[in-house]
Image: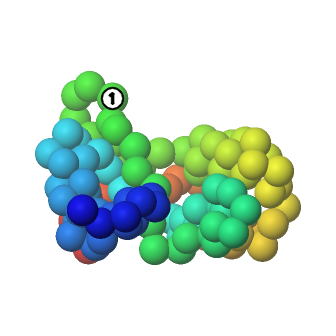
């Protein structure tokens, strides 16, 4: 039996499978240049992730208010003591002033 240590991080195939599950559950991708802040010491920010949301019941909206996304990003980065970071500025800079478009996961 192989020795200890933490399990290997999930690969791309697992990430793609998760996106398929989220899509089947109705998740929508926000059209924003999202950068996940560092989630701990030695863990770099990640810029190859999607920011997703689940639509309320009924037809999926085509967009949401940019201020709602902005408020979430500000609160999230602040909670991680990374408010004002270059990554946060990049995300906030990519937000349209009025609305943020939503797309089905997997749509280009």
Residue 11 position within the rendered picture, expressed as x and y whole percent measured from the top left: 30, 71
Of the 4 image quadrants, the one containing the N terminus is bottom left
31 lies above or below 18: below
What residue do we see at 25% from left, 57% from top? 19
Q: Nearer the viewer, residue 74 or 78?
A: 78
85 lies above or below 24: below
Q: Nearer the viewer, residue 108 or 98?
A: 108
Q: In this rendering, would 24 be left or right of 75?
A: left
Q: Nearer the viewer, residue 42 or 36?
A: 42
Q: Residue furthest front?
A: 1
Of the 4 image quadrants, the one containing the C terminus is bottom left
Residue underneath mark 1: 56
What residue do we see at 40% from left, 43% from top? 53
Q: Nearer the viewer, residue 97 or 15?
A: 15
Residue 20 in view here: yes
Residue 45 position within the rendered picture, expressed as x and y whole percent measured from the top left: 63, 69
Q: Residues within 10 Å of mark 1 (few under 14, many from 20)?
A: few
What residue do we see at 64% from left, 56% from top? 39
Q: Residue furthest top?
A: 57
Residue 38 position within the rendered picture, expressed as x and y whole percent measured from the top left: 67, 62
Q: In this rendering, would 66 be left or right of 74?
A: left
Residue 71 position within the rendered picture, expressed as x and y whole percent measured from the top left: 69, 43
What residue do we see at 34% from left, 38% from top? 54
Identify the element where label 1 is drawn: loop
67 lies above or below 88: above
Residue 92 in view here: no
Residue 44 sits in which quadrant? bottom right
Q: How is the image coloured?
A: rainbow
Residue 6 sits in which quadrant? bottom left
Q: In this rendering, would 20 be left or right of 74?
A: left
């Amino acid at each position: 039996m192989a020795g200890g240590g933490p399990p290997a991080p999930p690969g791309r195939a697992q990430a793609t499978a998760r996106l398929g599950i989220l899509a089947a559950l109705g998740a929508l991708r926000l059209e924003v240049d999202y950068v996940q802040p560092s989630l701990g010491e030695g863990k770099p920010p990640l810029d190859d992730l999607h920011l997703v949301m689940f639509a309320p019941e009924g037809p999926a909206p085509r967009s949401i208010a940019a201020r709602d996304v902005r408020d979430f990003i500000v609160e999230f980065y602040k909670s991680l003591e990374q408010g004002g970071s270059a990554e946060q500025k990049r995300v906030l800079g990519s937000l349209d002033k009025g609305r943020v478009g939503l797309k089905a996961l997997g749509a280009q």
